[in-house]
Amino acid sequence: MTRPALDDRLRAAGLRVTRPRIAVLETVEAWPHSDAESVHARLAGRHPSLSVQSVHNVLRALTAGSLLRRIEPADSPALYEARVGDNHHHAVCRECGSVRDIPCTVGHAPCLDPGDADGFTVDLAEVVFWGLCAGCRDRGVPMTATPESPRRSHD
């Protein structure tokens, strides 16, 4: 996305346009499902004064402004993506931790009906599918994880 378009998106979200916000937003758009440390590592060469804590703060602001979505697969750091507003789901590889977007399973948001939500009004269903990605499966990695342990241990 062009710099003016990113500036406009930040302003529309009620956020000031700053170099760290532009840099983090560009990075997450280019590398979806990144954690804060990965974003920081990708920016360190171009923005040496940008600390990991600053990246966390920018990610928090961009998420609060609905420019990024935060996902939290079990046993993983929080991951961020720029694909927002479509209520898609995720598939996570138990072996390598790769994450892929999966279209909403049924229709529109929240796309799943919890039945009795005990008074809650549900507007989002966040589903994580666990399994093996094609690369790990092709390498012969066995499917050994149980539902109680989403990620395999590599001890």
Image (spheres, rainbow, N blue to C red):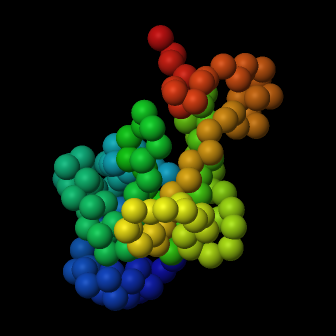
- Asked if residue 71 lies left or right of residue 49, the reply is right
Q: Quadrant of residue 94?
A: top right
User: From what the image shows, is residue 11 above or below residue 142?
Assistant: below
Rendered residue at 67%/35% (across/down): 131
Rendering coords of residue 82 (x, y %):
48, 66
Q: Which of the two residues, 45 or 28, is positioned nearer the viewer here?
A: 28
- Asked if residue 123 lies left or right of residue 144, the reply is left
Rendered residue at 55%/22% (across/down): 152
Rendering coords of residue 149 (x, y %):
51, 26
- Residue 142 visible in image: yes
Rendered residue at 19%/49% (across/down): 53
Q: Which of the two residues, 13 or 106, is positioned nearer the viewer here?
A: 106
User: From what the image shows, is residue 99 above or below residue 31?
Assistant: above
Q: How many marks?
A: 0
User: From what the image shows, is residue 76 above or below residue 151?
Assistant: below
Rendering coords of residue 125 (x, y %):
52, 62
Q: Quadrant of residue 105?
A: bottom right
Rendered residue at 31%/60% (across/down): 59
Q: Quadrant of residue 28?
A: bottom left
Q: Which of the two residues, 106 or 30, is positioned nearer the viewer here?
A: 106
